[in-house]
Image (cartoon, helix red, strand yellow):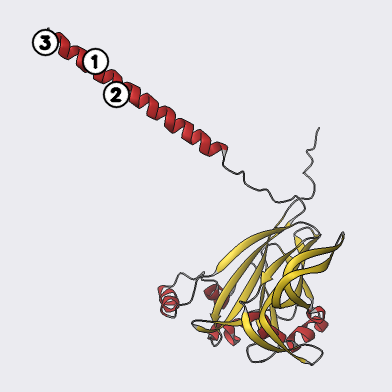
Amino acid sequence: MRFSSAIHIAMLALLSCCALACDSMRFARSSAQQATAFKLPTLTAPRDSVEVDIVFVDRPVNDPLLGKTLWREIDQVGTLSAEQRATIREAGLLVGHVGSSPPDALQSLLNLTDEDQERQRREANGIPKTAARRVALPAGTDTEIWSNEPVAQRSVTLAAGKPLELMNARGLLRLKAERSQDGWARLDFMPELHHGQTGTRPFAGTAGWMYRTTQEVIPCFAQHFSANLNVGEMLVLTCDRERTGTLGQSLFQFEDSAGPKQRLVVVRLAELREIAPNRVRTK
């Protein structure tokens, strides 16, 4: 009898373990199904969009790589028209064109180098890593590229020659992109200075006047520029650090706890989406 009772107890314990295992399996399966059900699907870029990669690099103002070391390897002639080059140079802006294979100086700035010595130098100088994002621009839309960090007080002289005193100022590049031909796109940049208090202000949209919450905006129409890029090519944008008080320095320079900094912005044409699906030929 005692032996039979022991068998019964063992069988009950085994059945209890099986029941608990089944319950835990059902719970795990339902949790996985629930997680899958609430997972957001990946967004697909519009079919007519232009995709660009935007990379931000913040370096000390006196970094040698921001000077002749970089710009002697970058084409500043063929990118823009002669009139555009003269206008932006006077405003203290530097814009250059780079192919799909960046030169050594730009690779170092973008932290693409594998050399241990360069990596150790960056860590010793407290240089932050680069930040990057990809943007898909449908036809007729734009994106905002913040070219520096807010500055409490800024003195700047624009094309009219009158100096301005701006409070809580920050620079912005408004980017639009349009397909020009197969494998090519036209990138348009409008520099803007944002300053003052944030408030609701009217602005002109495609459907008429609209409202948005922003600071006061100074659009720099005279320094508007554009360039045609092939897929994989890049534009490099920053300021001439030797031309003080210019629009360029107001757009790309700022100061943080580590001292004066200058931002380098690299815009790469990443991909052109097909406007229409490919047709399948039938015999």
- Looking at the picture, does residue 218 appear above or below residue 232? below
Q: To which residue does mark 2 refer?
A: 17
Disc 1 vs disc 3: which is toward the camera? 3
Category of crowding for the residue at label 1, using alpha-carbon neighbours closer than 10 angstroms: few (below 14), some (14–19), many (at least 20): few
Q: Secondary structure at mark 2?
A: helix
Q: Amino acid at mark 3?
A: Arg
Q: Is residue 259 left or right of residue 157?
A: left
**In 3D space, how far apart are the residues under numbered discs 1 and 2 (Cα atoms)?**
10 Å
Q: Is residue 261 left or right of residue 205?
A: left
Q: Tell me where residue 85 sits by quadrant.
A: bottom right
Q: Tell me where residue 236 sits by quadrant.
A: bottom right
Q: To which residue does mark 1 refer?
A: 11
Task: Work out whether mark 1 precedes mark 2 in sequence or the reverse, and give the earlier one.
Answer: 1
Q: To which residue does mark 3 refer?
A: 2
Q: Are marks 1 and 3 in contact (CB under 8 Å)?
A: no
Q: Secondary structure at mark 3?
A: helix
Residue 19, image x and y in percent?
34, 22
Task: Work out whether mark 1 precedes mark 3 in sequence or the reverse, and give the earlier one.
Answer: 3
Residue at x 80% of width, y 88% of height: 159
- Looking at the picture, does residue 232 appear above or below residue 161? above
| Quadrant where the C terminus is found in the figure | top right
Q: Amino acid at mark 2?
A: Cys
Category of crowding for the residue at label 3, using alpha-carbon neighbours closer than 10 angstroms: few (below 14), some (14–19), many (at least 20): few
Residue 228, image x and y in percent?
77, 69
Q: Amino acid at mark 1?
A: Met
Task: Work out whether mark 3 precedes mark 2 in sequence or the reverse, and give the earlier one.
Answer: 3
Asked if residue 72 can be seen in this view, the reply is no
**In 3D space, how far apart are the residues under numbered discs 1 and 3 (Cα atoms)?**
14 Å
Q: Tell me where residue 211 sits by quadrant.
A: bottom right
